[in-house]
Amino acid sequence: MNFYLDFEATQFSERIISIGCVAENGTTFNSLVNPGKGAKITSFITKLTGITKEMVDGAESADDVFMNFANWVVNTSLCAKDPHPKYYVYGDNDAEFLQRTINHMSNPMAISFATSIKALMTDYSKT
């Protein structure tokens, strides 16, 4: 099953504030992410994404969002009878956003899932 990902992140700490994903079967996952302490939503990011500090302050942590995302990926892949997900991003920033977010996560299962995404990601802007 192919999954097409897009992460939005803070400007300077580059932590994920939004995950959007479309599976090849057309189902979608999207969630805001609270980037945690020390991460600021600048006016540039708000203008670019429409995401405000107030929106992410009320969002779940990266640990919780990645666990929800993992459950969605597993269920979507099982429904398609394809146990081998492939993740596609456009551009090389997403891997860096993911790593910087992983560095601030604490749930081992969420970290494992996020790390597996990073390992399996393909940047299709190069093709």
Image (tube, rainbow, N blue to C red):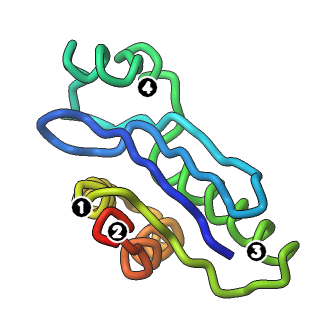
**Are the residues flagged by discs 3 and 2 in contact, CB closer than 8 Å?**
no
From the top left corner, tell me how far across and down residue 55 is, in percent: 47, 18
Give the Cα separation between the discs numbered 2 and 4: 27 Å
> What residue is shown at x 78% (from left), y 66% (from top)?
76
Q: Is residue 119 above or below residue 34?
A: below
From the top left corner, tell me how far across and down residue 74 is, in percent: 73, 72
Q: Earlier in the sequence, mark 1 or mark 4?
A: 4
Mark 2 Cα within 10 Å, few/some/many (few <14, many 20+)?
some
Towards the viewer: 3 or 111: 3
Give the Cα separation between the discs numbered 1 and 2: 6 Å
Residue at the disc numbered 1: 92
Mark 4 Cα within 10 Å, few/some/many (few <14, many 20+)?
many
Instruction: Kindly identify the amino acid type of the residue bearing the numbered disc 3.
Output: Ser
> What residue is shown at x 43% (from left), y 25% (from top)?
56
> What residue is shown at x 19% (from left), y 18% (from top)?
44
- On the rendered structure, is 44 left or right of 121? left
Residue at the disc numbered 4: 56
Tag in front: 3 or 4: 3
- On the rendered structure, is 119 left or right of 28? left
From the top left corner, tell me how far across and down residue 114 is, in percent: 44, 68
Instruction: Kindly identify the amino acid type of the residue bearing the numbered disc 4.
Output: Val
Q: Is residue 94 above or below residue 88?
A: above
Q: Earlier in the sequence, mark 3 or mark 4?
A: 4
Mark 1 Cα within 10 Å, few/some/many (few <14, many 20+)?
some
Residue at the disc numbered 3: 77
Q: Earlier in the sequence, mark 3 or mark 2?
A: 3
From the top left corner, tell me how far across and down residue 29 is, in percent: 66, 47
Give the Cα separation between the discs numbered 3 and 4: 28 Å
